[in-house]
């Protein structure tokens, strides 16, 4: 009897390998979709089991290591995100994947991320983390070597940081499984509280926390480690990016939660609190706030549709980090809620981008326009996604953002409050840029015979769009699951209503009254005389007659005034900083190659002699 | 159910009528400052009736129609959540964050409609409107944060009730700062000078509004009226104490008195906006952004930090 956790984790891997080996068009797609559907089905089934018992556990012994897997409330939610968005992304890949190479690595990365979520010891966590990174690196490598190397370099940097942190913990604790580490560190905090010597010194705690922060920050795309994300997200199959941005970045977020679970009490004891937030969490929250602003502003200035959403993805992850950083029960629930809604709307957005690129073959705003008439289904999906990301009630994006706003502001954190307010406006700004450039206005003549979304992509988008609406009107569905994490009704209310005691939001009520408002407006509209449809050239142009030769749309530099306003800040670039450091190291290596590793055997013999002499003088 | 429908209808009627009166007042007061006579106060109503009864209307497609309807629908939605004396329907759900968002989304509908027309002025106007929104969001956010932190609740209605015992918000220093910042923001929300960058008459031909005519424009006029009413009402509620009159025995008299008190406060807010509007010339968009990110932000952030202490 194979354990269900193993099936959840390894089904995509198996399907990926099968699809790669068989490599028959039609069959490999079917195998891939089944491979992504199996974990989802088992996860839904696990919901039943989790309602009767607190967790599902499994462990295997392999090569001297004992790998523990555990499914409980928190990681069930994250695994569900992976299941649903992964499934939708794989459906999208049916239309957009070019060969079996993509199927193999896309599905392996799904296995990797599911493994990260379900692992219950640091060894398994690290191995699956690397599987996930490697597979996603391979996906980018196929499209763009430079972008993939940047991603790889930062990921390796993060991975080393994590490995060192794990090493320190193992050296001190002597175990790798989460339960033991958690217990030992908890005892350590108690020891410190009662004035005995502690196992970990203050500096060691700073080091471990810092290393984990770097490791998870890289994957989540946290400022200033975000520089890989815009390139990597945009330079790959866009259906896959739905998973890349929607799910894989959540591994970083989940990692931040693991910091809380494993080290939380110890760090809290060591560094104390800042207001209601733990001090170490406040660092995460501030970096998250900066991520929102930097990601959002840069998203508004992009000229490439894929880049825009890559930066927007970074910006939205910032919200989640703010919520996690504030570290109250409510804010963590709000953050996980936003992780759910981010996966839903950003997964949807990348599938829309995939559709647009698949149908038009273009990626830059300057080549697009007026597609709403040609692709009505895709536009309807985009409409849902735009409203959701912009945080318009009654969609899921508003519910989660609202929770986050209330959670942060209620803890008297004005600076973070200001940052997230700014973030919601910048969301509006870059979304309208996307809407204007792609869907509305004058259409370039070469796009006149663009077709609507192919069926698999349409189904995938439909699933995500539906969930965006359902979880928006009935936000309590998600809140109920989130409350189980703390075993307490942190977010009160019914399935339609979120009630925090100091604020209420009712999704259904808003829907009803919005419909009432729309009906009243529609009545006034239909009471008026009939309308006559006119073409885009029949427009006010200061008295000039307009033909299609005129360019009516602002195709480039839409937010030029913003660019001018921010000119000073845009000169500071972490990407360039890293590039300069990279170049500097390259130069150093070049110099060393020139003078030291010069390839002359004589020189090497001298080095050997010098080393031996030093050793001899040392008295070895 | 019927009671709620009747109430909602009355609120809507009152808000629309008063909104149009406000528009008339803006025109008269502006004219008097210019030493003109100005149109009669009911002129905006006549204009709107004229627009709605046009025989020939043009459209640029479904989004063009829907955007306009959405703008009005969302404005009505926002209005229902703001406490209006003792009569509002959804005030129990009148959350600060929710109302702040709801007051912004009608603009999304207008932008969608304007941009789908394909007119270059409309595109330019949309760009300016969004950058204005981005500019005002920072001080606006801090002002809302200050309020929520000072009162420890997000419910607009509870904030109004709290002001009946502790005095108007603006009598407390942190909230006075927040109110000043919010009032500067309000200038841009009304689309008045010096922040009328998005419509900029004579420069970009009314920007987003340029393509609208006939019943589309008529619906947007109604939307503008209700939005004007809702925005002044929201400010009066959260900063100027709202109105809860319980002096009379009859509930109807109490309601009328509350509405009158609110109306005076709303007019005061409106007058400040008009006086500032007629004096100042227009900013350019980058000047506006720099301005909003400097003084109002500093003032509002100071308020928020003081309220948090």
Image (tube, helix red, strand yellow):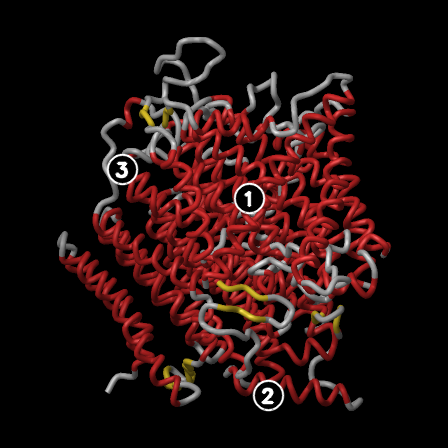
The residue closer to the viewer here, A554 or B200, is B200
**Residue A138's x, y, as percent?**
36, 53
The residue closer to the viewer here, B297 or A297, is B297
Q: Real-space Cα distance between discs 2 and 3?
A: 54 Å
Query: Residue A183 — which label?
Result: 2
* Res A214 visible: no
Q: How many neighbours does mark 2 have within 10 angstroms: few (below 14), some (14-19), or many (20 or more)?
A: some
User: Which residue is denoted by mark 3 in the rendering?
Assistant: A359
**Residue A193's x, y, as percent?**
76, 87
Contact, mark 2 vs mark 1 (Cβ under 8 Å): no
Seen in the picture, residue B210 relative to B72 is either above or below; the reply is: above
Lateral position of residue A355 relative to residue B64, left or right: left
Task: Please identify, in this view, whether the residue under mark 2 or under mark 3 is nearer the observer.
Answer: 3
Query: Residue B71 — which label?
Result: none
User: Which residue is denoted by mark 1 in the rendering?
Assistant: A598
Residue lying at 56% horizontally and 71% vertically, measured from the top left: A499
Q: Secondary structure at mark 2?
A: helix
> In the current view of this chain or complex, which residue is farthest to the top?
A544
Lateral position of residue B211 relative to residue A224, left or right: left
């Amino acid at each position: 009897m194979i354990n269900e956790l193993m099936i959840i984790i390894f089904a995509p891997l198996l399907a990926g390998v099968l699809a790669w080996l068989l490599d028959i068009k039609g069959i490999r797609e079917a195998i891939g979709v089944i491979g992504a559907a199996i974990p989802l089905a088992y996860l839904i089934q696990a919901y039943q089991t989790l309602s009767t018992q607190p967790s599902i556990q499994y462990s295997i012994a392999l090569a001297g290591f004992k790998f523990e897997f555990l499914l409980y409330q928190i990681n069930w939610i994250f695994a569900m995100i992976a299941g649903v968005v992964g499934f939708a992304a794989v459906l999208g890949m049916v239309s957009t994947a070019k060969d079996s190479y993509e199927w193999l690595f896309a599905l392996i990365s799904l296995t990797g991320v599911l493994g990260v979520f379900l692992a219950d010891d640091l060894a398994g966590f690290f191995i699956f983390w690397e599987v996930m990174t490697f597979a996603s690196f391979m996906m980018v490598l196929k499209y763009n070597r430079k972008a993939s190397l940047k991603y790889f370099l930062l990921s390796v940097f993060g991975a080393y940081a994590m490995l060192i942190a794990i090493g320190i913990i193992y050296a001190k604790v002597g175990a790798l499984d989460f339960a033991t580490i958690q217990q030992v560190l908890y005892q350590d905090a108690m020891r410190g509280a009662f004035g005995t010597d502690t196992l970990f010194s203050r500096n060691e705690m700073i080091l471990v926390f810092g290393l984990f922060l770097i490791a998870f920050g890289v994957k989540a795309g946290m400022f200033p480690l975000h520089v890989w994300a815009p390139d990597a997200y945009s330079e790959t199959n866009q259906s896959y990016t739905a998973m890349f941005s929607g799910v894989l970045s959540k591994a970083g977020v989940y990692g931040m939660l693991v910091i809380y679970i494993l080290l939380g009490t110890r760090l809290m004891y060591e560094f104390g609190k800042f207001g209601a937030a733990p001090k170490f969490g406040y660092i995460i929250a501030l970096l998250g706030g900066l991520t929102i602003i930097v990601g959002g502003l840069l998203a508004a200035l992009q000229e490439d549709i894929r880049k825009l959403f890559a930066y927007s993805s970074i910006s939205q992850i910032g919200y989640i980090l703010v919520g996690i950083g504030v570290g109250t029960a409510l804010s963590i629930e709000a953050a996980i809620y936003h992780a759910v809604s981010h996966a839903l709307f950003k997964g949807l957005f990348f599938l829309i981008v995939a559709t647009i690129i698949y149908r038009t073959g273009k990626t830059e705003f300057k080549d697009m326009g007026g597609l709403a008439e040609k692709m009505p289904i895709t536009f309807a999906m985009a409409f849902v996604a735009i409203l959701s990301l912009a945080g318009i009630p009654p969609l899921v994006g508003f519910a989660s953002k609202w929770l986050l706003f209330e959670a942060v502001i209620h803890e008297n954190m004005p600076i973070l409050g200001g940052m997230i307010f700014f973030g919601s406006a910048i969301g509006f700004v870059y979304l309208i840029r996307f809407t204007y450039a792609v869907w509305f206005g004058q259409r370039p003549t070469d796009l006149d015979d663009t077709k609507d979304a192919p069926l698999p992509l349409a189904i995938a988008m439909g699933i995500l769009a539906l969930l965006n609406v359902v979880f928006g009107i009935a936000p309590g569905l998600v809140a109920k699951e989130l409350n189980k994490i703390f075993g307490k009704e942190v977010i009160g209310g019914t399935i339609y209503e979120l009630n925090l005691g100091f604020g209420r939001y009712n999704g259904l009520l808003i829907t009803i009254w919005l419909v009432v408002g729309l009906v009243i407006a529609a009545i006034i509209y239909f009471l008026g005389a009939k309308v006559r449809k006119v073409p885009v050239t029949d427009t006010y142009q200061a008295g000039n007659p307009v033909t299609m030769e005129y360019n009516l749309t602002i195709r480039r530099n839409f937010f030029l005034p913003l660019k001018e306003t921010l000119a000073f800040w845009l000169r500071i670039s972490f990407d360039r900083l890293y590039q300069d450091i990279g170049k500097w190291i390259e130069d150093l290596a070049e110099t060393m190659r020139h003078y030291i590793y010069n390839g002359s055997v004589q020189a090497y013999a001298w080095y050997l002699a010098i080393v031996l002499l030093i050793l001899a003088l040392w008295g070895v | 159910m019927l009671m709620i429908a009747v109430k909602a209808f009355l609120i809507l009627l009152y808000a629309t009528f008063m909104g149009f009166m406000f528009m008339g007042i803006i025109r008269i007061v502006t004219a008097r400052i210019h030493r003109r006579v100005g149109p009669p106060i009911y002129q905006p109503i006549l204009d709107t009736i004229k627009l709605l009864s046009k025989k020939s209307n043009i459209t640029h497609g479904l989004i063009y129609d829907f955007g306009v309807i959405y703008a009005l629908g969302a404005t009505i939605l926002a209005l229902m959540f703001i406490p209006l004396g003792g009569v509002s329907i959804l005030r129990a759900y009148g959350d600060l964050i929710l109302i702040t968002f709801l007051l912004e989304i009608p603009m999304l509908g207008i932008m969608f409609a304007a941009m789908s027309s394909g007119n270059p002025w409309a595109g330019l106007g949309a760009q300016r409107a969004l950058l204005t929104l981005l500019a005002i969001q920072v001080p606006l956010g801090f002002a809302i944060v200050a309020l929520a932190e000072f009162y420890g609740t997000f419910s607009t209605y509870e904030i109004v009730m709290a002001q009946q015992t502790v005095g108007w918000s603006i009598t407390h220093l942190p909230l006075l700062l927040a109110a000043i910042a919010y009032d500067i923001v309000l200038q841009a929300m009304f689309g008045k000078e010096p922040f009328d960058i998005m419509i900029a008459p004579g420069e970009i031909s009314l920007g987003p509004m340029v393509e609208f005519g006939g019943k589309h424009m008529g619906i947007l006029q109604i939307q503008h009226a209700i939005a004007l009413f809702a925005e002044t009402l929201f400010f009066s509620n959260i900063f100027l104490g709202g109105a809860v009159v319980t002096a009379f025995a009859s509930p109807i008299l109490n309601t009328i008195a509350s509405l009158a008190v609110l109306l005076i406060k709303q007019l005061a807010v409106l007058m400040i906006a008009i006086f500032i509007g007629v004096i100042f010339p227009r900013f350019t968009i980058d000047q506006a952004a720099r301005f909003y990110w400097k003084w109002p932000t500093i003032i509002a952030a100071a308020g928020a930090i003081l309220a948090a202490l």
